[in-house]
Image: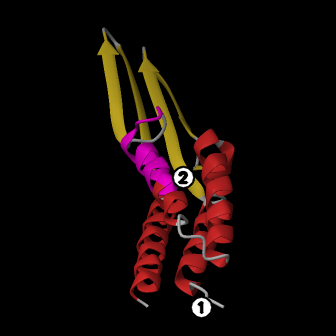
């Protein structure tokens, strides 16, 4: 029986947990004629957005594949890495970090979207999963 890849299993577990943590925070503010208002989401968890649900399912599948020592398990980690990176860089319309502002006459508006700790953990766990499943695959070929 092949040796279990505990680091890859741990990384898959961390990716699953990170989906329930805040991924992005959206905030906005506006002012006009001496009146102002602002709003902050306080953090939107990954499970609340489609990319987080997809990431959860892929992380669970990747954990199962790592447990069963399926040689293409690294693909699950690569998919999740690209998924998380896409949200960080704004490829999917959410996240991307950055601030947007506009003003006209006496009014102004500002909005910002910032990545949060859950998204960083998700990307890191996915990268570790890819590295250690590939390392395990390489180790099996040399034996």
Identify the residue at horizontal 60%, vertical 78% (top origin): 9
Identify the residue at horizontal 58%, vertical 48% (top origin): 42
Quarter location, residue 143: bottom left
Quarter location, residue 56: bottom right
* Above or below, comparing residue 43 to residue 63 in the picture: above
Q: Nearer the viewer, mark 1 or mark 2?
A: 1
Q: Is residue 122 left or right of residue 114?
A: right
Q: Which quarter of the image is occupied by the N terminus?
A: bottom right
Front-most of residues 35 and 75? 75
Q: Is residue 18 visible?
A: yes
* Above or below, comparing residue 116 to residue 142 in the picture: above
Question: By what rule are the colours in the image chosen?
Answer: secondary structure
Mark number displayed over residue 55:
none
Q: Which residue bears the numbered disc 2?
A: 23
In the displayed image of the protein, which residue is found farthest to the top? 105
Q: Earlier in the sequence, mark 1 or mark 2?
A: 1
Q: Bounds of the magenta span? A: 79-93
Q: Position of residue 103 (x, y in %)?
A: 31, 17
Q: Which residue bears the numbered disc 1?
A: 3
Q: Position of residue 82 (x, y in %)?
A: 43, 50
């Amino acid at each position: 029986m092949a040796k279990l890849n505990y680091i890859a299993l741990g990384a898959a577990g961390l990716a699953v947990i990170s989906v329930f943590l805040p991924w992005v925070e959206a905030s906005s503010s506006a002012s006009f004629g001496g009146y102002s208002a602002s709003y902050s989401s306080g953090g939107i968890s990954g499970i609340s957005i489609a990319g987080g649900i997809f990431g959860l399912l892929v992380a669970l599948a990747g954990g199962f594949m790592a447990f069963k020592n399926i040689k293409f398990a690294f693909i699950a980690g690569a998919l999740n890495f690209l998924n998380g990176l896409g949200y960080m860089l704004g490829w999917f319309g959410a996240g991307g970090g950055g601030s947007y502002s506009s003003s006209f006459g006496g009014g102004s508006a500002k909005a910002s979207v910032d990545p949060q700790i859950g998204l960083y953990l998700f990307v890191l766990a996915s990268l570790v999963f890819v590295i250690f499943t590939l390392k395990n695959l390489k180790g099996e070929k040399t034996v």
